[in-house]
Amino acid sequence: MMEGEDELVHEERLSPNHDERTLPISMVVLHYTEMKPVGTALDRLTDPEAKVSAHYLITEEGGVIRLVPEDRRAWHAGASYWRGIPDVNSASIGIELDHPGHGLGYRGFAEAQIDALLPLLARIVKTYDIPRANVVGHSCVAPMRKVDPGELFPWDRLADYKLCLPRPQCLAAGNPFHNDGSFFLALERFGYDITDQAKAVEAFERRWRPERITGVPDGEIAAILWQLLLDRDQGRTR
């Protein structure tokens, strides 16, 4: 199907802000724009002086706008790291969600927006065989700088369609970590940049226990992390 006939894309407004990839596509990073109205975000994402972009922007009404072709490296993640990859932009597809963000009145995400995200994300995941653990938020890959898409993003809806990892429900193994040092080594092993330990914990909580964000390791998040690692190491996830 030609790009102009893409049934999942309603508009194309190409940004000049992209370059060549140096890595194969292996992840998707989800953002919010933290700008209103949506035209403000579009203007910035296509402004050559801003030097930022993404592959897609999805409006709150469910409109999908292509900004950068998938085979090109969009400039959405900035200084970031995930599972040993420091050049997240080269390895990822970036999707911006039209949203006021924490700066302009944080709230839940529009139903129409998530309804438009699901089939687009499903196609991307299938096309590039992206592991569910690599469908992440901006805060996951840049915990020292970013908090988007935030604690109200409906990861559970994505998980229902096997488009991201679900929150572990069985925590029978409990907390196996004897001290914070072993917890942070495990957090790094799962994929996070732990340079700023408190911010790394906040990012983990925002994704896996969004109802309580403290920045301090505790038994519950340790048990969640341990189960995530067990599932991956035993081949149930990747």
Image (cartoon, helix red, strand yellow):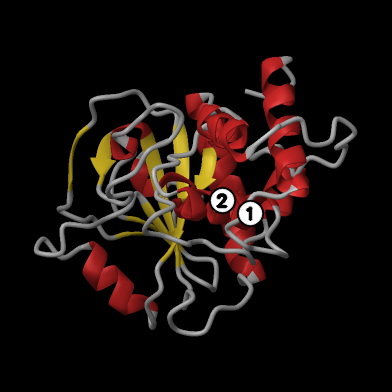
Question: Pointer 2: residues within 10 angstroms few (<14), some, or many (20+)?
Answer: many
Q: Secondary structure at mark 1?
A: helix
Closest to the observer, 226 or 185: 185
Instruction: Residue 10 in the image: state x and y as whole percent.
Output: 43, 59
Residue at mark 2 to residue at mark 1: CA–CA distance: 6 Å
60 in relation to 169, above or below? below
34 in relation to 75, above or below? below
In the picture of the structure, the residue carrying the numbered disc 2 is 201
Closest to the observer, 188 or 125: 188
Instruction: Residue 228 in the image: state x and y as whole percent.
Output: 70, 32
What is the quadrant of the C terminus in the image?
top right
Q: Nearer the viewer, mark 2 or mark 1?
A: 2
What residue is drawn where x is 63% and y is 54%?
A: 205
What residue is drawn where x is 43% and y is 80%?
A: 103
Q: Which mark is residue 205?
A: 1
Q: Quadrant of residue 18?
A: top left
Closest to the observer, 84 or 77: 84
